[in-house]
Amino acid sequence: MTTIVDYGAGNLRSVQNTLDKLGFGYVVTSEPGTVVKATKLLLPGVGHFGQMMTALDRLRLREAILERASAGVPLLGICLGLQCMFESSEESSDSKGLALFPGIVRRFTGQMRIPHMGWNSLSPVGASRLLKGLSEEPYAYYAHSFYVPEMNATAATTTYAHPYTAILEHDNIYGVQFHPEKSGPVGLKILQNFLEI
């Protein structure tokens, strides 16, 4: 069963509405025992890196998510859900992420408006399973102050002052920095592609 992880925050209702529109069944849970039975996992995220990790640990969800990831279950992190897949973040340097990927999530710096909010294009880097069936540079909706630098698992970039990871894909682990549930038909197609993996 497709399982949406509920750690007490995040944009759950919008994600649920999108899955309803696509016609996919799912459960929403904060129970580790339900997470470890998932056949697909969605990890939405809105808020603060440290608070998210504290909530995951309090609910004993960290171990359940990592168990499913190591078992090869497709996992999709959305926005902060992507960022928490890394070792740490400049937003909360003393908080340990899930460490599915090495590296630190960085804060935007410079003269541009922070947070980065609004529509921006996606530039594929090689083949992307999430972007299958979409145009060459589709647009998606962003709302964030921190970003993941380009890395080996980067499947698409976007540029805000400089290029950074918009989509990552590695084996069964997927992440999107934007909000597919707020990105219209493009977001629907990206979530559909994930759910059909």
Image (tube, grey):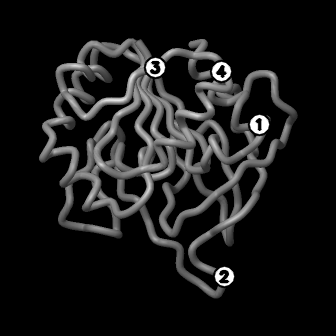
Of the two numbered discs 1 and 4 on the same chain, state the one appearing first in sequence.
1
Residue at left offset 22%, top offset 22%: 67
Which is closer to the viewer, label 2 or label 3? Answer: 3
The three-letter code of the residue at mark 2 reads Met
Residue at left offset 40%, top offset 61%: 47
Is 118 left or right of 72, judged from the image as shown?
right
Residue indicated by mark 2: 112
Residue indicated by mark 3: 26
- Secondary structure type for disc 1: helix
Q: Is residue 160 above or below residue 15?
A: below
**Label 2 vs label 4: CA separation?**
33 Å
**Label 2 vs label 1: CA separation?**
26 Å
Q: Is residue 38 above or below residue 57?
A: above
Of the two numbered discs 2 and 1 on the same chain, state the one appearing first in sequence.
2
Q: Identify which residue, 96 or 142, lies in the foreground.
A: 142
- CB of mark 2 within 8 Å of CB of mark 1? no
Q: Position of residue 124 (x, y in %)?
A: 73, 38
Q: Residues within 10 Å of mark 4 (few under 14, many from 20)?
A: some
The three-letter code of the residue at mark 3 reads Tyr
The three-letter code of the residue at mark 1 reads Val
Q: Identify the mark at residue 186; answer none if there is no mark.
A: 1
Residue indicated by mark 4: 193
- CB of mark 2 within 8 Å of CB of mark 3? no
- CB of mark 4 within 8 Å of CB of mark 3? no
Q: Position of residue 100 (x, y in %)?
A: 32, 37
Is 103 left or right of 164, judged from the image as shown?
left
Q: Residue 60 lies in what quarter of the image?
A: top left
Residue at left offset 39%, top offset 12%: 39
Which is closer to the viewer, label 2 or label 4? Answer: 4
Q: Position of residue 115 (x, y in %)?
A: 57, 73
